[in-house]
Amino acid sequence: MASPHLSEAFPWFAAMFPNGLHTSIWLVIPLGAAVAGVFGILLGAPTLKLRGDYLAIVTLGFGEIIRVFLNNLDHPINITNGPKGLSQIDSITLFKFESLGIPGLNLGRPLDITETYTINSVTLYYYLFLALVVLSVIICHRLEVSRTGRARMAIREDEIAAKAMGINTRNMKLLAFGMGATFGGVSGTMFAAFRASSRRSRSA
């Protein structure tokens, strides 16, 4: 959605969007998080009765299956471009307001502070990712001390006792799968934009 790949792969899409869709990253991030969360729940549902090493083996197996599947999804219809991946993904732009004529801060380009001091693109992305890590830590801490977090800790200590206390262990496990996948979806979206920017910087 943030690259011209759909226009290159599908002629009917190119007729509607000749230059590609180029959706804003702030719309792509929640969509990526939602899609990843849904697939996390769908993949977690068959593994609810597994514990310990068996759960680890199944989740690792699912991860490998998904990787191979996406690497081969370039034919007969080119959706993921196979192992070559998607190119020309838009870089992240902060504080952009086109209606007010504010171009914003493009993290894919160096930021000139003065004539002699410039902050490169990698450093800009580093501080953005650092802020997201801090936000993730705060969210995880709030979850830990919440009612949901206490229920998860009870399941971790003794699932049978937690179930006897009225905790819906099935829903809590599915929620854990979904939330873990959601964090992965957000980080994957950000990583794709960062990798595209670093490729452009190397080619330049």
Image (cartoon, rainbow, N blue to C red):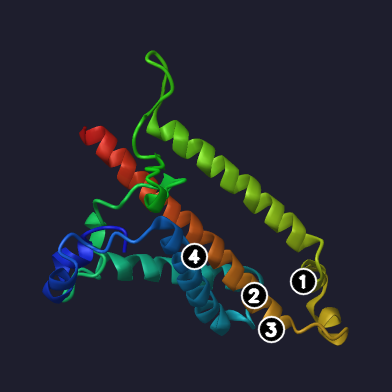
The quadrant in which the N terminus is found is: bottom left
* Left/right of residue 169 with respect to residue 188 in the rendered view: right
Q: What secondary structure is marked by label 4?
A: helix
Pointer 4 with pointer 1, Cβ within 8 A: no
Residue type pointed to by label 1: Thr
Q: Nearer the viewer, mark 4 or mark 2?
A: 4
**What is the C-alpha distance between the residues marked 1 and 2?**
9 Å
Residue identifier under label 1: 148
Pointer 1 with pointer 3, Cβ within 8 A: no
Residue identifier under label 2: 175
Residue type pointed to by label 4: Pro
Rendered location of residue 12, percent (x, y): 14, 76
Q: Which of the two residues, 6 or 93, is positioned nearer the viewer here?
A: 93
**What is the C-alpha distance between the residues marked 4 and 2?**
17 Å
Does label 1 or label 3 sit earlier along the sequence? 1
* Left/right of residue 78 with respect to residue 137 in the rendered view: left
Rendered location of residue 201, percent (x, y): 28, 34
**What is the C-alpha distance between the residues marked 4 and 1?**
22 Å
Residue identifier under label 3: 170
Q: Residue furthest front?
A: 100
* Left/right of residue 148 with respect to residue 195 in the rendered view: right
Rendered location of residue 56, percent (x, y): 57, 67
Q: Which of the two residues, 97 or 24, is positioned nearer the viewer here?
A: 97
* Left/right of residue 167 with respect to residue 133 in the rendered view: right
Does label 4 or label 3 sit earlier along the sequence? 4
Residue depicted at x 70% and y 77%: 172
Residue identifier under label 4: 30
Q: Which of the two residues, 159 or 123, is positioned nearer the viewer here?
A: 123
Does label 4 or label 2 sit earlier along the sequence? 4
Residue depicted at x 46% and y 35%: 124
